[in-house]
Amino acid sequence: MRAKTGLSNPYLHLLVTMVLWGSAFSSSKSVVDHVPPAVGAVLRFGGGAVALLIAILLFGDRRSAVSARDGWRAASVGVLGVFAYNGFFFWGLSLAPSLDAGILVPVVSPILTSAALLLTGKERAGAARVAGLAVGLVGAVIFFIGIGGSTEGGSSRLWGDLLFLLSAVCWAGYTLLGPRVLAGVDPLRATTYATCAGAFLLSLLAAPDVADVEWSALPAAVWLNTVYLAVGAAALANLLYYRGVGAVGPANASLMMFTVPVVNTLCSTLLLGESFGWLQGTGAVVLLIGAAIAATQGKIQARRVALAEQPSGDGELLSHRRAT
């Protein structure tokens, strides 16, 4: 992997992106500890929508025009990738530790995407790919067996992790729809349209809970986390990811996604004091190994692919799609 030096190093951009995404799980958990899950989702993605709109004004390509049809199609995927995904995700955070979310969501979703592509015949079932999916499945089983025997969280943790699995299913579906629905739309604009549409639907879902929140009593940490999630994990992370992918190609960039569970584990254990037992830890490691094998098919692709040749989509969408 070749890279430039200094602040223009594309791998530095990608590493910063993964740190932002990995830390977003524990940061989101801190928010839903004080507000209902739906309200927490609106705070994050409503703010993210505003930040992305500002990013379009500052960094968007003013020469590129998006037709009304393409704009509506880009917004439509926000129903699945922003609204449904985050509805399940924030609900799960109210029941289970962010530590579990940071393992299940970024690792299971590319496994589900790969499995769907193989079952529909859109990708070839190579031995390494099948082996990776099988190993990942074994890891998921071990992980959930570990939850059943855990004394921390009880049944609520199990239900929360099942909601995280539904989030992963939504993201896999979003990933599969992305290339067809978002083709021809500038990535930043597509991300903005999807985020705005999803945030609007989340606001409708959260409307009944808004009056129950004691806004004046919310600690400053909640607002700081909200700003961090909106500006950092949404707008800035996506912009840096696009730069990184453009420089090193989606195949190499997707491999960086496997640092997200590591970052999340560090943040969740050090900042929130969360933990899981040795059996869950074993399952998490097996999951990561299986996902890595399935994503790389047993080897690292050194071939450089230009971003302009790839379908448009959300930064995280590209990450999960290229991980398959």
Image (cartoon, helix red, strand yellow):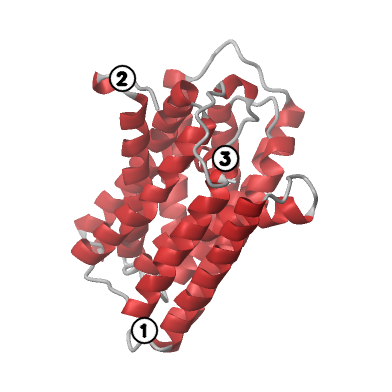
The mark found on residue 8 in the picture is 2
Amino acid at pointer 3: Arg
Seen at 72% across and 51% down, the residue is: 125
Residue situated in front as seen by the camera: 37 or 117: 117
- Disc assigned to residue 7: none
* Mark whose residue sits in front, 3 or 1: 3
Label whose residue precedes the other's in the sequence (3 or 1): 1
Answer left or right for 315 relative to 36.
Answer: right
> Label 3 near label 2: C-beta < 8 Å?
no
Badge number at residue 153: 1
Please say whether residue 211 is visible from this viewpoint.
no
Element type where label 3 sits in the image: helix
Spot occupied by residue 323 in the image (x, y as percentages of width and height): 54, 44
Q: Disc 1 or 2, which lies upstream in sequence? A: 2
- For label 1, the crowd category at 10 Å Cα-Cα, with few meaning under 14, some 14 to 19 and many 20 or more, is some
Q: Which one is in front, 298 or 251?
A: 298
Q: Nearer the viewer, residue 112 or 271?
A: 112
Tell me the residue at 53%/23% (across/down).
304
Horizontal and vertical percent position of residue 3 = 35, 22
Measured as percent of width and height from the top left, residue 248 is found at: 45, 25
Q: Is residue 279 visible?
A: yes
